[in-house]
Image: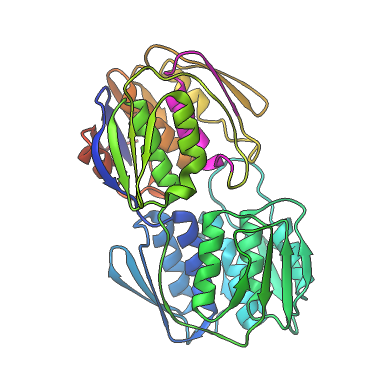
Amino acid sequence: MERLVINGGTALRGSVEINGAKNAAVAILPAAVVASKGKCVIDNIPDIEDVHCLERILRSLGCTVNKLDNNTLEVDSSDVTNFDACTDDVRRMRASYYFIGALLTRFKQAKVQLPGGCPIGVRPIDQHIKGFEALGAEVVIEHGSVILKADKLVGADIFFDVVSVGATINVMIAATLAEGITTLENVAKEPHVVDVANFLNTMGANIKGAGTDIIRIMGVKELKGCSYSVIPDQIEAGTFMIAAAATKGDVTITNVIPKHLESISAKLKEMGAIVEEGDDSIRVTVDKELKGVNIKTTPYPGFPTDVQQPMSALLSTVAGRSLITESIWENRHKHIDELKKMGSNIKVEGRVAIIDGVKKLTGAIVKATDLRAGAAMVIAGLVAEGETQITSIEHIDRGYPHIENKFSALGADIHRIKVQE
């Protein structure tokens, strides 16, 4: 097993380049299965465990996957005839459910193992199933798998009961080859939803309205391979912005789309940090004591749920009281117990974390309870006095490429060790 070891107290300084968006890449790679001709060459892919897992799933289906470099994959799905995605890798990660929409639209049938992922709360796929059934699929869940069949898929008007990124993307993928027009309402507007739509359009789909309240998909007969570059990772960028503020540093974050980060920038400015936007960069500096703020997570363009855990680490050492209300996932405050081991003063009431800032955190052995909680513990370790060891870092590796190298380049004292658990 591996751990991250951090000796805190160093202000981060320098420049860090952000990788491609995890949340876009893990949907784009399954969507490549829909291409029945040609190869998809996808670059700016993050070198993370979730992507490696998807590579294995693609190969198990019969795709040819070549790694052209650390951040570029070539996927040829033209010879795929297998629509059964039931492997340990499928069970291991949440985003494997995008294979349902991809296999369904290409083969008019699919069998996909129910997925896993981070334990941050109940994440049903009922809205996905609602969409697939509206398009004409029969859906059965048995023995831990979702089994879908359709004589044909026909466009439909679908209104999602809740705003769901996963359902929006999955049903959008499934509708690309459906006959006629599909209209999706009450959809998610996240940047990675738009990115997946752009990828599908580059393959030959006809999707309009991604990023707005209504997405319309005119079905086409086939999709073909293409070349595509994934957008920068909004969440990785936000994590480094927060780390810069937490350590009272001076960090320029490059390869970003500043508009995607507006809700994070606004809160850091409200706290007293200096946030300067460039065309494709953001610089975060701190020249005074920061103050507490109140945050409520909401769908994009609101404050991202994936950033609230790193933000809680920052707010732990900020003067005054802060409130974080988690409105997306009911179980996303698990990391609070780990922050308490380091001396934070946080009380959780339902979905609200009440944070009273303390003067310092102290190093401890803590656990990454999930992916973004792991990022929170890294930030806490960076500001803490003494040594922090973070266990279960396989969660961090699922979404942050080479996190210790990036922080080391900014001056942090952080390294990875092997231990006998």
Residue visible at 62% across and 70% down in the picture: 208
Which of these two is toward me, 115 or 202? Answer: 202
Q: Is residue 110 visible?
A: no
Q: Position of residue 367 (x, y in %)?
A: 42, 32
Which of these two is toward me, 286 or 370? Answer: 286
Which of these two is toward me, 8 or 420? Answer: 8
Residue visible at 73% across and 82% down in the picture: 180
Q: Is residue 261 above or below residue 196?
A: above
Does 169 lie within the magenta span?
no
Q: Position of residue 234 (x, y in %)?
A: 45, 49
Q: How many marks?
A: 0
Residue visible at 64% across and 41% down in the picture: 328
Q: Position of residue 397 (x, y in %)?
A: 38, 47
The quarter of the displayed image where residue 155 is located = bottom right
Q: Position of residue 284 (x, y in %)?
A: 34, 35
Q: Quadrant of the N terminus?
A: top left
Does 306 lie within the magenta span?
yes
Indicate left or right for 181 with 293 as reference: right
Stretch in magenta:
302-324
Q: Is residue 415 visible?
A: yes
Residue visible at 78% across and 76% down in the picture: 136
Q: Quadrant of the C terminus?
A: top left
